[in-house]
Image (cartoon, rainbow, N blue to C red):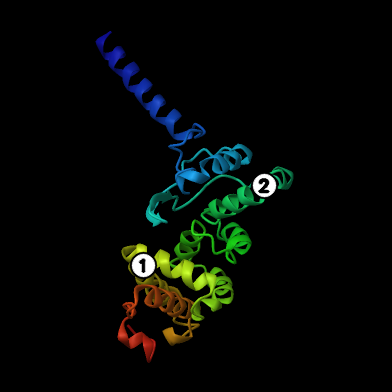
Amino acid sequence: MGGCGAINASYLAEASAYARLVQPLSDRSNPLITAFPAELASAAEAVLAVMPDSRLQPHASFSVAVEGQRVLIPGRLYNDEPPADRVASLSSRQQQLLHCLYSRHCDGMVRQRHLEKIVGSTDPWVVPFVVQLVGEYVLEILVVICDELRDLATPGTCGHLAYGQFLVDNPAFFARTQRRVVSYWSCYYRGTYASFRGYPGCTILDLLRSAASDRAGQPWPNLAPAGTRVDGYC
């Protein structure tokens, strides 16, 4: 009997752990709510209400500062996209938050589709979602970002100020992003872009460093290996 009891207890513990994994998340500790500043919690809850449940929790969240608040953004999201009529029922702000979240989706085409809805925004809670995508590997996404962020080269623009402030507030996050851009180019895109200087990710980093440098009042460190700036080899 003792053996059966131990087996039952183990089974119940595993079942409970599995239930916690697959159950819908619906409170304010939900990582899809903590991805935004506290004042947006109600809007984020409205977004969650239209999102299909996922059998997997968001994966590999990362923490950044947004206007003095720590937010925890999912590395990957596994929820299916909601029907168009449910998205249309949301306010413009709620739709923006939904697009931010789905820019973290596990499917690269879904990420790109939702990025295109928010990349032109300079709202401070949108910026980290865009910068995170700079440090990822989908070339088509980098091209979208590169095209949309060109005004970062112009001091005084809203984008220049918003991105500059975020990067100054999150230097370690930006350093990791720079290293990832170089790594993904080296692993996947040397054949297409023999020189790192021609790679869209390099152009984006130049724009971001320009904004950070102006905000910091001094040149921002360029973490690309020196060789990549000339001949394309680390």
Q: Quadrant of the C terminus?
A: bottom left
- Report the residue that reaches farthest toward the bottom: 230
Q: Which label's residue is closer to the chain start, 1 or 2?
A: 2
Number of other residues with Cα within 10 Å of mark 2, as a class: few under 14, some 14 to 19, many 20 or more: few
Mark 1 secondary-structure assignment = helix
Whether residue 144 sits left or right of residue 2 in the image: it is: right
Mark 2 secondary-structure assignment = loop
The residue where tag 2 is placed is 91
Kind of residue at badge 1: Val
Q: Which quadrant would residue 148 be assigned to in this image? A: bottom right
Residue lying at 43% horizontally and 70% vertically, measured from the top left: 164
Residue lying at 47% horizontally and 82% vertically, measured from the top left: 191
Decide: is 153 above or below 79: below
Residue lying at 56% horizontally and 44% vertically, measured from the top left: 79
Residue 208 image offset from top left, x and y in percent: 44, 74
Residue 230 can be seen, yes or no: yes
Residue placed most toward the observer, 172 or 91: 91
Whether residue 108 sits left or right of residue 18 in the image: it is: right
Residue placed most toward the observer, 188 or 219: 219
- Report the residue that reaches farthest toward the left: 2
Residue 133 image offset from top left, x and y in percent: 48, 64
The residue where tag 1 is placed is 168
Residue placed most toward the observer, 164 or 7: 164
Residue 198 image offset from top left, x and y in percent: 48, 86
Decide: is 148 above or below 40: below
Decide: is 91 above or below 232: above
Residue 32 can be seen, yes or no: no
Kind of residue at badge 2: Ser
Count up the numbered dots.
Answer: 2
Residue lying at 48% horizontally and 66% vertically, measured from the top left: 162
Whether residue 219 sits left or right of residue 58 in the image: it is: left
Number of other residues with Cα within 10 Å of mark 1, as a class: few under 14, some 14 to 19, many 20 or more: some
